[in-house]
Every structure is written in structure tokens, then in C-alpha cells.
Image (tube, coloured by chain):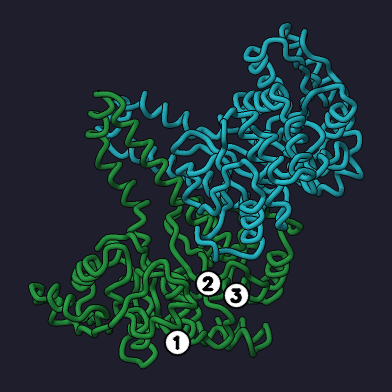
Chain colours: A cyan, B green
Amino acid sequence: MTIALDAMGGDRAPGIVIAGADMARHRFPGLRYQFYGDGEHLEAMLAGKDGLRACSTVHHADSVVTNDMKPSHALRHARDSSMQLAINAAREGRVDGVVSAGNTGALMAMAKITLKTLNGIDRPAIAGFYPTMRGESVMLDLGANVECGVENLVQFSIMGEVFSRTVLGIPRPTVGLLNVGIEDAKGHDEVKQAAARLRGMDLTMEFLGFVEGDDIGAGTVDVFVTDGFTGNISLKTAEGIVSLYNSLLRQAFRSSIPARIGYLLARNGLAKLRTRIDPRRHNGAMLLGLNGIVIKSHGGTDAFGFANAIGVAVDMVAHGFNDKIIKELEIYGAAPPAAVRAAYS
Amino acid sequence: MTIALDAMGGDRAPGIVIAGADMARHRFPGLRYQFYGDGEHLEAMLAGKDGLRACSTVHHADSVVTNDMKPSHALRHARDSSMQLAINAAREGRVDGVVSAGNTGALMAMAKITLKTLNGIDRPAIAGFYPTMRGESVMLDLGANVECGVENLVQFSIMGEVFSRTVLGIPRPTVGLLNVGIEDAKGHDEVKQAAARLRGMDLTMEFLGFVEGDDIGAGTVDVFVTDGFTGNISLKTAEGIVSLYNSLLRQAFRSSIPARIGYLLARNGLAKLRTRIDPRRHNGAMLLGLNGIVIKSHGGTDAFGFANAIGVAVDMVAHGFNDKIIKELEIYGAAPPAAVRAAYS
């Protein structure tokens, strides 16, 4: 398996990309990398790392997609960028997946134009992981589509369910549509119609109807589906509240000498808590619905976080996510409800 | 000052309503109450509480708005409910404000029909408090309007700014529109146009443009403005994440004997942290934009939380919020930009 890495994307590239790849290589023996970026610089950085160098090739790219570049501009003027060349490698079948910590909008636009969407998918979505009381849930869309129609929400539900079942291995994932209440009459037309469609489709997915914002932390369903505007703001609200709580907790432990000692006594348990909600552990958002595996790493992550994003790409490739979703979409598009159910069993 | 209390609204009514009123009365000497609900039951509950009884009157209501009642149904069939009678008292000038822990949708619908919206306001909004790194911010709309046009977002911004300035006493509140990025090109048409309108209006409000979900925890602005769909889901996401963190923290402190001792040593600091993010302290959402002061308490709150909701009503009445917002809206509607600025200075 070979993964293309956009070595120039992210706040601390290419350092954390190379260090992250080195970390992930120990977790996935046999994994190979193609680094896309400033060739000379990358060669110099790889020089000391014999193990990593042996399983990597370096591919020079003349330019870089910056964070403030508009997607439309990047599409036209960054054809020789590390991001675009990495995606080209996926289109040409030279790699099995792509990971980038660069500009999200540009990555989505380039991936969509270059790889095209899967048959039956109008628009790709960004999916990510949330820590919950029950473990971990998937949420989509996290920002690829600020406006979503009924059909988009239905397609996101199917993609999220297949992802959860095939990649995460949950036998019968539960799916919920984020809304302002759980009653049928709540919400705007798009969510109401999407819910009606999903209820009527006789998919074998466990569609639980509407869920609310506080169900995310509770982990009420395995897959939370929403439009990209709401999903992005909800995700970032959660990140901001975790930062706030972390910071208040630090203040609490520094507020007195006994509190400092208390921290030392409790630190093993607290370390577990930190691990549980560590955003780096949940790093790696999936661009679902493309003819190819593309993973977006958080731009500000470190090597550990980037290694986890590579891990997400490896999982998606290893579980043949795209083949499975294509099959699912064919059934959904062509067959009558009874046949859908039969095809699952 | 007299406040009407819907004594039958909320999960633990009328118990927590009476206990909360008793608590708030000590904080605001001279405050008077009108309790609306089951007269006999209320009289019996007040019988032992001489201090509270002395500053209260009881007004019998034949029915109760239940939580599962649709707003349209409540409007037609609950005219003799404790909620409707309490709002009628506000319309007729018999009280200065209303507090209810009942059905939010019904409360908003009844308040809008009975009290009418302020001149210049098309739709009222629900505003609430968020704990932040900097202290506390206001956010609106939290769920009254699942779909909002440009004009609604502009009006919410003005109402939020006036609230923050007049009731919270922030001299020059900063205002931000929630979006999926801070760049001008980000987001859907409504937020983009609302931002353009607010920038062009030459209001003296400190409009900082777009803010993101993680700015809420950081407290980047004093007033966060968004549509009711996004606001509701963001608020509840935050609540769910706080519950998750609380619960993981409890687990951490129970994970070993040293951790338990650690908790005991750090508990003063931890108690401060808990107070800081205690949802009961931030209880009391304001229905802004009405010809009257109406406060929605969380349905599941306790007496302490309900007392805080009464406190919010008292603050709004004491600071003459509605008179000030009417003045502001007149200026905004009638005067040219220069006059607006002059009127503020």
C-alpha cells in the first residue's frame, strides 16, 4: 500500500509530515510513501532517516497551496503544487490514498475536480470523529457544503453508515439527523424531508430520526448527519469548549499548593482523560464520496496527529471503503426496497 | 417591580418555581411575584412560607401547556393555561416581566402573538449566555427561528449589542457573525450579505465580521449572532461536551485511591471550575424583540437555576432594555448614518 503525502500542507510542514510518516510506518509495516513537495528540502530532511527513506520516494512540486488561497484560485493557478500532484498520483493509480494538512477548501475542490465523485453522489462530504460517552462517533458534513439539499443529506447518511460499518466495523450503525428537536415537526424543510426519505427507503441502516446537539457528547448514534455549515460550527464549538475546560482545569490545579499535590496524585487518571479527548487522536477527516481516498489532517496538528491521519487513510484503503460504498449506492439507486434488504442479508 | 411566574412550567414545577422565587426574593428586596397555576395547590405550597407569601399573589389557571404540545395547538387550546395568563399579565401592564420554564416553542408563540414584536423587529430571537475564557458572552438566536434571512441576522446583531451594552454594562460590545471561516468569501449568502450590511451601516457597534465555533469558548466577541438552527445545535453541542468532560473527570478521580485523595486536595479549585461552567448559573434565556420582558428558564433546572432566570428578568426590567432597544431601532430605521453616530456620542 502506498500513500501520497502533501509534504508542504499545514502550519508546520514539512517537519511534522515527515516525522508523522516515520511514526506511522512502525504501525503499518510494508506501507510506502510518496512525498510531494520541495524536492531538495525533502531529500535533505530524509537524509538521516534510513528506515523512512527506504520506503519513500520524493516527487518535486514547484509550488504550494497556501492557507489563504481561494479554492477557485488554487484550481487554476496551483497545478504544479504539492497538493495537486499528490491528488494526481491517486487519479493515475500510482498511490492508494492521499493525506494533506493543507487548505481544506482547495483540497476538496482539487480532489473533486481531479478524482470526480462516485456514481450516485452529487457532492462529497467531510467526515470526522468525535469522542463520546460511548467511545467515538462519526459526523458529516464538517464543512464541505455550506448549503445542503435533501438529497445531499440522504447521501451523507448512506456514506456515513457504510463508513461506520465497513471501516470502523460496527455491525449495524445507528444514524441520526442533527436537528433542533426530536419531534417530526421540528426543523427546516431539508431535514424534515431528508428524515422522511430515510424512513421510507427501507434501507437496513438503523435510522433513528432526529438527534440534538447534546447527543453528540452522549454518543446517542454512531453517525451524525448534518449540513456543512452546522457541522463545522458544531465541531469547532466542541473544540473551543474542550480548550476552555482544559484551561480552567489547569487553573484549578494551580490555584493552591494542595491542589498541585492533588494533581500529582490524580495524574494517571487525568492522563487517560486527556488521551480520551485528545484532538490529535481524532485527527484525520475523510473526504467521502470521491473516486479515491483523501484524508485531511488538521493544519495545526503535530507528528502524532499526522500519523493518525495516515492511519485513517490506511484503514479506508485496507477495508475497501470505496468499493463497498459503490456497491451500496448501486443497490440504493437501482433496486426495489425488498431487494435492498435481501442484498444486505 | 413585579414578575409573573408560570408556576406550572418545567420538569419539576411548581416546586422549583416556588423555591427559586423564595431564593431570588432575598437577592432583590422589594420584588413582588404573581404566581400563575393551580391555585389551590399553590396556596398550599405557599402556606408555610410567610416571607414569600407576603410579596406574592396567586392567580388560578385551569390548564397547563405540556412539553409535547405544538405551539400552534397551545395557541388555540391553552388560552386558560398558566403560561398564557402570565403573558397576558405582561400585556396588560400588571407585571414587568414573565419567567417560565415551560415549552419553549409555545412560550415564544404565545409571547409573540400576545405581546407583539417591537417596531422594526420582524422576528424575536432567543438569546442566552455562554461561559468563555474571558467571562461570559451572549449568543442569539438559540432556536426561535430555524431559518433566518439577512434582515433577521442584522436585527439580531443590533438586539444583542444593545442587550450587552445596556443590561450587561459592556461599554462597547463586540459583535461577530458565526460562520465556517473568517474570510469574506466563506459561508452562505445570508451570512455574507448580513456581514456586508452590518459593515455598511456605520453603526457604532464594534462589528468584527465573521467568527468561528471555537471563538465561542474563547470569548472572542461579546455577542455571537447566528440563525436559530445553528445556534441551538451549537449551544447543545457545548452542553453535551461539558457533560462528557464532567463525567470523564469524575471517572478519572475515581480511578485509584491516590486519585481520590488528589480530588480531595484539589476540590476547592475544582469547585470554582464547576461554578464557572455551571449551566444553572447561565440559566435564563431572553426572548428579545418583544413588547415585554419574557425569560425562558431551562425546563430541567433546579431552584437555584430558576432564581437566576428571575434575576435575568429583574436585570432587563431594571435596565429598561426594551425602551433602549426601541430608541436604537428608531435611529437605525430612520436616520442617516451620520445621525446614528451622533446619537450614540
- Which mark lies nearer to you, 1 or 3? 1
Residue type at mark 2 is Glu
B340 w.r.t. A73: above or below? below
Q: Earlier in the sequence, mark 1 or mark 3?
A: 1
A315 w.r.t. B315: above or below? above
Residue placed under numbered mark 1 in the picture:
B114
Q: Residue A330 appears in which quarter of the rendering?
A: top right
- Which mark lies nearer to you, 2 or 3? 2
Q: Residue B51 appears in which quarter of the rendering?
A: bottom left
In the rendered view, does A130 fall on the left or right side of A67?
Answer: left
Kindly identify the residue that appears in the image at 68 percent across and 77 percent down. B201
Residue placed under numbered mark 3 in the picture:
B204
Q: Chain of mark 2?
A: B
Residue B305: give x, y in percent of width and height. Answer: 30, 62
Return the residue nearer the eye: B340 or A108.
Answer: A108
In terms of secondary structure, where does tag 1 sit? helix
In the rendered view, does B63 fall on the left or right side of A83?
Answer: left
Residue placed under numbered mark 2 in the picture:
B161
Q: Chain of mark 1?
A: B
Q: Earlier in the sequence, mark 2 or mark 3?
A: 2
